[in-house]
Amino acid sequence: MTTMAILISGRGSNMMALAERCTSGDLDGRIAFVASDRSDAPGLDGARRMGLPTALLPYGERGRMAAEEALSDLITREGVDWIVLAGFMRLLSPSFVDSHRGRIVNIHPSLLPSFPGVDAIGQAWEYGVAVTGVTIHLVDEKMDHGPILAQEALPVLPTEGRQSLEERMHQLEHRLYGDTLKRLFRCRLTFEGRRVLFDN
Ligand code: GAR
């Protein structure tokens, strides 16, 4: 079974969707802990309610380097295979990424490289795109950047408002993250240039 650490900054709906898939046995994974950079992240309560261990990373009081050291210590102690970013709104340092390269995965609510950064759904909505979508990628040193593992497009319906689009995007995220991790945990990755291939 694959061991994950999930990092969140907010609501934690992607984390909860992954936790439910682990509980049901659909995803052959174990969540060692859920960590947040924010003590007021509502997802921390959600994780506790699901019986998952939580950790607060001391970004606020001690800065990024100390927070990442604390995170690395937990990862080593818990034997974590994959660091899963689920709405974690901090840029990891180049040295952290280097130490855990190829073991950090992120979800972003746009078809990257369009609309990186905060409020990607709002950015796409304001731009007036006809098609948006969700990207899951390995994490490198840049924000919302790195080799793409999965992308799925979602057409913006001519009749819908922003709230409807957000709800449909989150539904897509919750499905696609679990499906992609399932493949990731079963397969070996090979790289052809920037393209990632899943080998059984
Ligand atoms: C999700 O839409 C996720 O893709 C996004 O934050 C949201 C967190 O929601 N991540 C990014 O924008 C990363 N740049 P959640 O806390 O309910 O899972």
Image (tube, grey):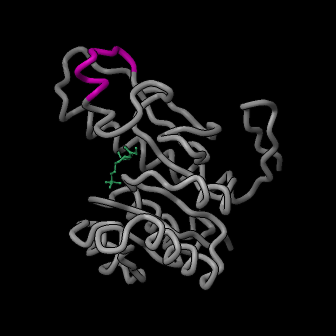
For the point 38% across and 83% down, the residue is 51
Q: Is residue 10 left or right of residue 25?
A: left
**Residue 58 is a magenta residue:** no
Q: Residue at x 58, y 48 (%)?
A: 139
Residue 77's place in the image compared with 122, above or below, is below
Position of 9 compared to 183: left or right? left
User: Toward the viewer: 51 or 110?
Assistant: 110
Q: Position of residue 13 (x, y in %)?
A: 33, 57
Who is closer to the viewer here, 157 or 198?
198
Residue 144, compared with residue 152, is above or below; it is: below
Q: Position of residue 147 (x, y in %)?
A: 65, 38
Residue stretch in magenta:
123-131
Compared with 90, 128 (above or below) is above
Rendered residue at 53%/78% (across/down)? 32
Q: Residue at x 39, y 37 (%)?
A: 109
Q: Which quadrant of the structure image shows residue 26? A: bottom right
Question: Percent from the top left, x then y, of residue 30?
Answer: 57, 75
Q: Quadrant of residue 98?
A: bottom right
166 to the left or right of 18? left
The number of callouts visible is 0
The correct choice, above or below, for 114 with respect to 177 in the image is: above
The quarter of the rendered structure image containing the N terminus is: bottom right
Residue 117, quarter of the rendered image: top left
User: Residue 189: horizontal and vertical position, in percent?
Assistant: 78, 48
